[in-house]
Amino acid sequence: MRPSTLRRLVALTAVCVATLSVGALPATADSVTGSSIAVGYRPWGVAITPDGTKLYTNSEELGGSICVVDIATGITTALIQAGNGTIDVAITPDGAKAYVTNSLDDTVTVIDVGTDTALTPIPVGDRPWGVAVTPDGTRAYVANSSSNTVSVINVASGTVTSTIAVGLTPYGVAFTPDGTKAYVTNFNEASVTVIDVATGTVGAPIAVGASPHSVDVSPDGTIAYVTNYLAASVSVINVATNTVTATIAIPQGTRPSDVQFTPDGTKAYVANYVGTTVSVINTATNAVAQSITVGQKPWGLAFTPDGTRAYVSSYTTSTLTVIAVDVLPVLALPSAVLAATVGAPFSFASRIAGTPVTTFSITGGSLPNGLVLDAATGVLSGTPISAGSSTFTISASNPAGTTSAQYTVAVAEALVATAALAATGVSPVPLAVGAGATMLLGLVLLRRRGADAAACARKDQPSDA
């Protein structure tokens, strides 16, 4: 007898729909970790390779050099001769080259990051200061502070392809994440020049505070922060409209120099050159949330790619201060794929990132019967015991804040052999999800078919009687 059709065939894939939300950020708890790292004499700019393995900082040793630090060990591994008066350093997105401005030589030194050797310097404008590389890695922009221009370097050829006139005494330069705009601070003009990267043309200058020095654009490309060195403030620029929307006060007399957003964009660090502090700005409120004590005369800073560490150069002490950064928890995105079936083991890791240790909890709805959430790891696991759809919210909290995500998990019934199959003498067998279901059903059918064949053989054999 042929087995009858299966009693029910249910969709085997559960659907996960997550709606992510971020709660109000508490006061940050970022803190200095470990001992400071000794580097070359009077460090300025700081840059970290995209893979997070090396740090490069300027030094006045050898007349002008770059100090290379191994991030994992905190040990200086090389001191590379550059030009006179090194100021800033930027690394290409592919991590292959580093560009170093030599303010007293009117050149840029290019360093091969793989070998940590200096290549032929590139002549640029008068007294080059800040440098940045386009997000696509094809060009480097150099702010020439005494010639009031920006030199555009072709990364592939190592030559200057154009020169763009900007405001008085350009110091800092930064690109939007999409590479369409460059922002240049004009120190002696209290303004910021916006360059159209595609055409090389400039728009109307944006008025900011006194003596703007550094600029950085948020990871989502919506705002730019500009440090106003003499005004002791940070101007907030709306990138879409190129207008100042807020001004953030920094403690008077501190001379804010460098500014950098954290990789997740929730905070920005400002190095205050006169003194020993870094101001931490909550970007949601545009207010200083914390002040961290570092080495004397902090100038440059950079974050590791994962955002868990910040490195701050101290001009007077010739050291790097390492800061442990609290990173907002990140939960799995809506594209995460879940599969759940009655009687089959299930596991789903909701945590993607976040430091320090995060606490997880169910803050809405209910889990499918048989599943539990590990409060320490964020792993949802167990064996579902009933079919149906459950919607619930997972919240992850640490000192940086709380992130929540709403998930809907549909649990499918197990595939079961029909009563007709059971009538043959074989008990109904729950079948697992996926390819295993076909395999188990095949084994049952083969077993039944083999038993039938044996019975027929015995029937056809002649009797001994």
Image (tube, rainbow, N blue to C red):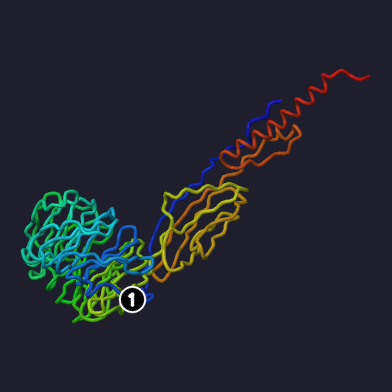
Q: Is residue 363 left or right of residue 342?
A: left
> Can you give x and y, in whole percent of width and height, for residue 279 in the image?
27, 75
Q: Is residue 461 above or below residue 63?
A: above
> Can you give x and y, in whole percent of width and height, for residue 321 in the image?
31, 74
Which quadrant would the C terminus be assigned to in this image? top right
Q: Is residue 254 above or below residue 344?
A: below
Asked whether 256 or 425 is in front, the reply is 256
Circle 1 residues within 10 Å: few <14, some 14–19, many ≥20: many
Please, which residue is most extreme toward the right here? 465
Name which residue type carries label 1: Ser
Asked whether 431 or 451 is in front, the reply is 451
> Can you give x and y, in whole percent of width and height, for residue 94 in the image?
28, 53
Provide the secondary structure element on which disc 1 rests. Answer: loop
Q: Is residue 231 above or below residue 86?
A: below
Which quadrant would the N terminus be assigned to in this image? top right
Residue 404 falls in image quadrant: bottom left
Q: Is residue 359 left or right of residue 195?
A: right
- The number of discs equals 1
Identify the residue position indicated by label 1 in the image: 36
